[in-house]
Amino acid sequence: MKNTLILGAAMGVTLTTMPAFAGQNDHAHHAHQNHAHHDHTGHEHKAYAPISIMGDHAHKKGEWMVSYRFMRMHMEGNRNGKTSLSPLDISGDFANVTGVGPTSLRIVPLEMDMDMHMLGAMYGVTDRVTLALMGNYLDKDMSLVTYAMMNSNQELGRFSTRSKGLGDTKVSVLVNAYEDDQHSLVAKLGVSLPTGSIKERDTILNPMGVLQDVRLPYSMQLGSGTYDLEPGFTYTGHTERINWSAQYQAVIRLGENSQDYTFGDKHVLSGWGRYSWNESFANSLRLSAEHESKIDGRDTQIAGPVQTANPDNYGGRRLELGIGVDWTGTKGALKGHHFAAEVSVPLWQNLNGPQMERDYNVSIGYKIAF
Ligand SMILES: [Cu+2]
């Protein structure tokens, strides 16, 4: 209860505008141990999803959840379809037909790290309807190599570009569509608000050997620039020690952004299982298949002899395997506090290339319901 009050105080203004919270602490505090399951026997099912998964559950009336997640996505090397490409494969030879005609590629991405900090809040408006809000902060770093305009084999130098700032903000409604002792189905309808910048700039080394300030390519921008619909469905089943789920999530872009393009729609199908070794520790295994379309339209400010400036070199299909671990406090000051980590690697990638390939994702996170 002390934790509840401390965290409650931290929520500050939000809480004082939510009079329904007062007097519900006892109920909510008990309920959160079962994480939205009807189980008053005292045994905790804790049907948590791997930390990289979102929108998988709803909350009981008056229950809050606050979460923080950090994710790093590491990309290294390039491929076209399923075939790996070296920087020299890309430089010069690769036909790069863009909306403004064919150009030779002279700048090749080598590595990219994308760090995401995600701060989320959920509130159970009723036993059936939960509202969720998530803010993102992004930090992207890409290193590249530049070859000479007149000689595609001659390396001129290497450089890196960086963009960081607020990403898009997600607001969603989660509905407890079905729930019994063993199974539940949660439907989600989210909207992604274009709060992330799509006009980030940095300095590059061009193939003439000159440093140049340019608008960064699409993958280095912080937002989509469009309002995006994010529907989803999650089925979860559980027994005493095991829970299993299947989830479908999509990102449907609405319209065109102010710079005349639209990122591709995305569809992700995931399945995961989780085994609880005891009341605190659990491991999870996740398999996700995703499909993302190419960029439609183009930003005329994004140009240059680099694959990422071509809207066709985006999207593709991936199969990814994630292994997770989580720990939930059962007594004392850490009761109900949930800590989790997950590492995922692509098992298969078929990309609209040349495009950077994903190497691994690492997610760590914290959740508390009260
Ligand atoms: Cu929650």
Image (cartoon, helix red, strand yellow):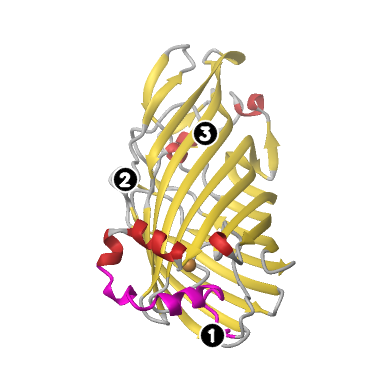
Query: Residue 104: x percent and y percent?
Result: 53, 26
Mark 2 vs 3: CB contact within 8 A:
no
Q: Callout 3: few (<14), some (14-19), or many (20+) C-alpha neighbours within 10 Å? A: many
Residue 307 is labelled as: 3
Range drawn in magenta: 17-40
Q: CA distance from mark 1 to mark 3?
A: 48 Å
Q: Which residue is mark 1?
A: 179
Label 2 lies in ligand 1 vicinity (Cβ under 8 Å): no
Q: Which residue type carries mark 3?
A: Gln
Q: CA distance from mark 1 to mark 2?
A: 44 Å
Query: Residue 143: x percent and y percent?
Result: 55, 27
Residue 213 visible within the image:
yes
Q: Quadrant of the C terminus?
A: bottom left
Label 3 lies in ligand 1 vicinity (Cβ under 8 Å): no
Q: Which quadrant of the view contains residue 86?
A: top right
Query: Residue 99: x percent and y percent?
Result: 41, 38
| Element assignment for label 3 | helix
| Residue at (64% x, 26% y) in the render | 87
The total number of labels drawn is 3
Q: Nearer the viewer, residue 97 or 112?
A: 112
Choose the circle earlier in sequence order: 2 or 3.
2
In the figure, is residue 85 to the left or right of 151?
Answer: right
| Element assignment for label 1 | strand
Choose the circle earlier in sequence order: 1 or 2.
1
Q: Which residue is mark 2?
A: 260
